[in-house]
Amino acid sequence: MSAPRRSTNPSGLERYYVLTKGRSGPGGSASSLDVATLIVSRTSPVPGMQHEHEEILRRCRDPLSVAELGAHLGLPFNILAVLLTDLLEAGHVEARDPIPAHHAGRGPDLALLEEVLSGLERL
């Protein structure tokens, strides 16, 4: 008799369910997160902490956007937002809204925009 086959779920839904402890979306302090929100660690990882939480704290020693963090960790936004909710509520990270250049007292950097346009034209 052969061993029972383990079901494989290529979408990773089972893994996400375990990571979020069954929660499907952020609540409370993380409900206003978007992909441009900057995340900054306020503490170091604590022994016994979930691996993904540790990884978020390590990567966010310097401000990192939610989009960048999701790309580094390979996690969809809603799953990452649930994990960030845990860390925000525990005081391990801080969420900062990015300050658009026009609100910071200066307009867009025209030289940078021209370089980007030039690079795009060369493609």
Image: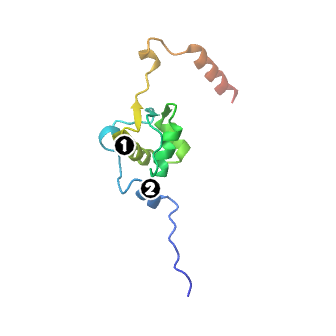
The residue that appears at 44% across and 21% down in the rendered structure is: 100
Quadrant of the rendered structure where residue 122 is? Answer: top right
Residue at (48, 49) in percent of width and height: 52
Of mark 1 and mark 2, the one earlier in the sequence is 2
Q: Residue at x 55, y 15 (%)?
A: 109
The residue singled out by tag 1 in the image is: 85
Point out the residue furthest to the front here: 47
Q: Amino acid at mark 1?
A: Thr
Callout 2 crowding tier (Cα within 10 Å): few <14, some 14–19, many ≥20: some
Q: Amino acid at mark 2?
A: Tyr
Determine whether, in the image, residue 62 is placed left or right of residue 27.
Answer: right
Numbered badge on residue 16? 2
> Relative to 71, is 111 above or below?
above
Screen quadrant of the C terminus: top right
Q: Nearer the viewer, mark 1 or mark 2?
A: 1
Residue 15 % position (x, y): 46, 58
